[in-house]
Amino acid sequence: MATDVHGPLTGHAVHVEGLTRSFDGRAVIDDLRLDIAPGEFVALLGRSGCGKSTLLRILAGLDRDIEGTALVPRRRAVAFQAPRLMPWKKVWRNVLLGLPGRAERSLAARALDEVGLGHRVDAWPKTLSGGEAQRASLARALVREPDLLLLDEPFGALDALTRIKAQRLVGELWQRRGCAVLLVTHDVEEAVLLADRVLVMDGGRIAHEERIGLDRPREITDPRFAALRARLLERLGVDTAAAAA
Ligand SMILES: Nc1ncnc2c1ncn2[C@@H]1O[C@H](COP(=O)(O)OP(=O)(O)OP(=O)(O)O)[C@@H](O)[C@H]1O
């Protein structure tokens, strides 16, 4: 039976209970439970193919063939690893894509300004660098004034330096906007750097949860940072001693 229970919710930014999603009779998500508080930053780790993107797509409302409960706020937005900009529309029109109401350039310009792209409002997508395109995709999410921001490996395709800048930007945007964030990532350091709570998904469920009680901004040189990173890597089945050798 497919139960679609997206709808309003109070006291949570995400409330998921008994969630199951199967493909060809195989449950990729299996009786999963997850609550995210308003304004909380949660990172989701897990080995490749464990169902992270599937969960994110469900929360984004892109996959409704589910069993169980998945409650998310109406105001939600999603950004993927690929910026998904329409090449035949200028950047500002891309930012407003699918947004109900009149296309107001000033609205897009404000969101682009917030991600440091105020000077590229009238640019064509093909003239943007990878990092700029990703920031435009973030602006497209922000313009929706989301209570919940869903990010599926948004920095995955960026070079190391651009990635660090983009991580910092997301941290700042989150602090300024106060929305809840669910960030799917493969990068344990990124998760510890940004999140209030890091979840490890395995066997179709949340198998482990780590609260990151470190003050912000966080330093990866902090021994407590290293300890959290090591514990999460262990949970992911990575032998840190061997990795360091
Ligand atoms: N539309 C689909 N049809 C059939 N199988 C699917 C479909 N979407 C996902 N799957 C399967 O569900 C499993 C979970 O996929 P998902 O993309 O959610 O994993 P993931 O944890 O995000 O992986 P990665 O970290 O590699 O991106 C995989 O085995 C995948 O092949």
Image (cartoon, grey):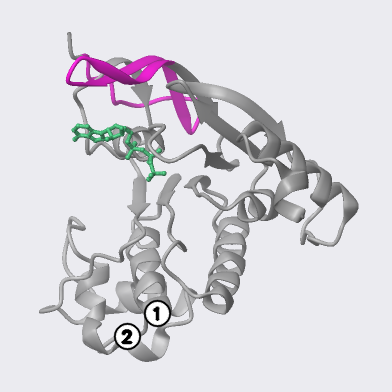
* Rendered position, 139 above or below 242: below
**Residue at (34% x, 56% y) in the render:** 80
Q: Residues within 10 Å of mark 2 (few under 14, many from 20)?
A: some
* Residue 39 position within the rendered picture, expressed as x and y whole percent measured from the top left: 58, 43
Label 1 CB less than 8 angstroms from ligand 1: no
Secondary structure found at label 1: helix
* Residue 46 position within the rendered picture, expressed as x and y whole percent measured from the top left: 51, 37
Residue 14 drawn in magenta: yes
Three-letter code for the amino acid on which mark 2 is drawn: Leu
* Residue 128 position within the rendered picture, expressed as x and y whole percent measured from the top left: 32, 85
Q: Quadrant of residue 31?
A: top left
* Residue 53 position within the rendered picture, expressed as x and y whole percent measured from the top left: 36, 40
Dividing the image into four quarters, tell me where ligand 1 lies. Answer: top left
Give the residue at mark 1.
132
Q: Which residues are magenta?
A: 3-31
Label 2 CB less than 8 angstroms from ligand 1: no
**Residue at (31% x, 40% y) in the render:** 60
**Res 229 seen here:** no
| C-beta proximity under 8 Å, tags 1 and 2 | yes
**Res 157 seen here:** yes
Locate residue 42 relative to residue 243 in the image: left or right.
left
Give the residue at mark 2.
128
Quarter occupied by the C terminus: bottom right
Locate residue 229 relative to residue 163 in the image: left or right.
right
